[in-house]
Amino acid sequence: MNPQKIDALFYAHSIEEVKTLSPLLEKFRTTVGKKAYIVVSGGGFCPCEEAAVALKWPKSVCKERRFKIFDLGIGAISAAVSDSEVPVFQGVYASMKGLIKIHNPSVVIAVSDIESNVKKALKMAAETNLNSSTLVLLPRSTVPKALWMADLRPTALPNWNRMRLSISIITQNRVNSLTRLLKSLSNAYYLGDEVAITFNMDSKVDEATLKLANSFEWAHGPKILRRRIIQGGLIRAVSESWYPSSDDNFGLLLEDDIEVSPYYYLWIKNALLSYHYDPQVSLPELASISLYTPRLVEVVKERPKWNATEFFKGIHPNTPYLHQLPCSWGAVFFPKQWREFYVYMNTRFTEDAKQNPVQIPKSRTNGWQASWKKFLIDMMYLRGYVSLYPNFPNQASFSTNHMEPGAHISAKDNVVKHDKSDFEVPLLGRDFRDLLPNGKLPPVGKLPALNLFNQAVSLKGLKAAGAKLGQDVLECGAAEVVVVDRETGLASHCAKF
């Protein structure tokens, strides 16, 4: 018999777990093209007919031959044998192993606080599937926030647990700002994922900031404190705040005057699974994911106002889009391109902007001094890389910049005046799915792309502009871009695009 292929197999060991998982199960079962079943422990633990009632299904489903809900009868077996956990473990493992083999689910879903022996049995059963079934354990409170899982392609679902986000906070002497940022990070939804947080403090960090960093309790993963001996300045503080530990480690860089939406992590995870972790989707140009939607075209001298919702209304007013400009006010950077950036910046860094060999035509970034972002812009322009940006009404975003005095804003040598209303955007305080085209992230081929100057262009056109400038670290032809070693970031050779 050929094995089936379903998207999700749910397991509930109690009626309360059935009720908790029911919204996500229903979302899978009502999504076109998706197929999902539920398994219950049965017996005294979770009788099938009670589970059916909790799901608002007729009790007859427990006797139907066509599989919809499966009763393992574990409770009855356990009670007949002994009070030991061993029969429960053995019963769940053996039954789930067989069901997983037959139905070949992309994911096996249960609540994260399920009994430890049951959790172990589910993990072992999922790992035995040669076709790769991933066990997803969701905290009960976050299940309603994970309904978008049903919109992911079956090829992306098994990668649910792969991404590892590292938050790097750059801070020195704005303790009130840092307090606000930490509160917003703590209030976000993480779906039970482990997220590391690092405080990067320059040598002149004040006492209040040190005490806050020391006392802050982070419930979602390890906390690390790093302090410089010699003052590094903003360019080093940011660019040296994170370096990827693997190809699945992504860096969220946040200065302390940033604040994030409770939904920021859901945006990141959804985007990564949709555009990076789906083996049937190809978008190698994607180098970062922005949390912020800009209101200005910041690379031209006049800095005109710009409204993405208005610009893209012919496609969809709230379509996400690709932009050649990296974001410095809340963004996740990809490991491969960040390694590239380290090597590129090491090769091209100069204190005098006029000595920089890269001069992008008509870009005010050519004169930026002591800016790590200037070097990242140069690299992305030369190699045709892009960032993914959100686009919601009134530029509501997953991060905002409070524009507080620091190394750039209100600095004595900064002649550019900043209007706070041009930069401080509202935070998205609601589930964003229903704002998206068709209620989900669009296919990669439907994402519009902009060049550095907010002009619509193809991804190939972006590469062509960089190749035409011809100022990368290797001399390449007019239809070639620099290719780098994925592990080291070192420039390797030129290749046609």
Image (cartoon, helix red, strand yellow):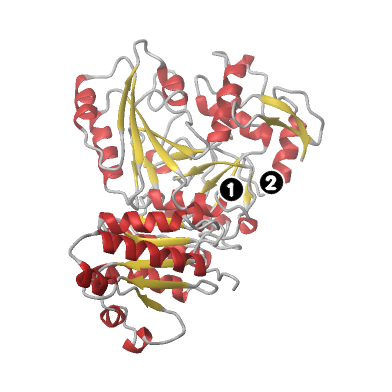
Kindly identify which residue carries mark 2.
459
Q: Amino acid at mark 2?
A: Leu
* Structural crowding at the residue carrying mark 2, measured as other residues with C-alpha within 10 Å and reported as few (<14), some (14–19) or many (≥20): many
The residue sitting at the top extreme is 230
The number of callouts visible is: 2
Percent across and percent down for residue 269 are: 45, 50
The structure residue drawn at horizontal position 47% and vertical position 65%, both measured from the top left corner, is 100
Task: Please determine whether, in this image, residue 430 is positioned above or below residue 378.
Answer: below
Q: Quadrant of the N terminus?
A: bottom right
Kindly identify which residue carries mark 1.
322
Q: In the depicted view, which residue is nearer to us: 438 or 143? A: 143
Mark nearer the N terminus (1 vs 2)? 1
The structure residue drawn at horizontal position 42% and vertical position 79%, both measured from the top left corner, is 68
Percent across and percent down for residue 241 are: 42, 26
Task: Please determine whether, in this image, residue 246 is positioned above or below residue 296.
Answer: above
Secondary structure at badge 1 equals: strand
Q: Quadrant of the C terminus?
A: top right
Instruction: Decide if residue 318 is in sight here.
Output: yes
Q: Is residue 330 left or right of residue 1?
A: left
Percent across and percent down for residue 239 are: 47, 25
Q: In the depicted view, which residue is nearer to us: 310 or 476? A: 476
Res. 470 image quadrant: top right
Task: Please determine whether, in this image, residue 319 is positioned above or below residue 252.
Answer: below
Q: In the depicted view, which residue is nearer to us: 74 or 465? A: 74
Contact, mark 1 vs mark 2 (Cβ under 8 Å): yes
Q: Amino acid at mark 1?
A: Leu
Res. 400 image quadrant: top left
* Structural crowding at the residue carrying mark 1, measured as other residues with C-alpha within 10 Å and reported as few (<14), some (14–19) or many (≥20): many
Q: Is residue 218 left or right of residue 334?
A: left
Q: In the depicted view, which residue is nearer to us: 33 or 385? A: 33
Percent across and percent down for residue 83 are: 17, 64
The structure residue drawn at horizontal position 35% and vertical position 36%, both measured from the top left corner, is 196
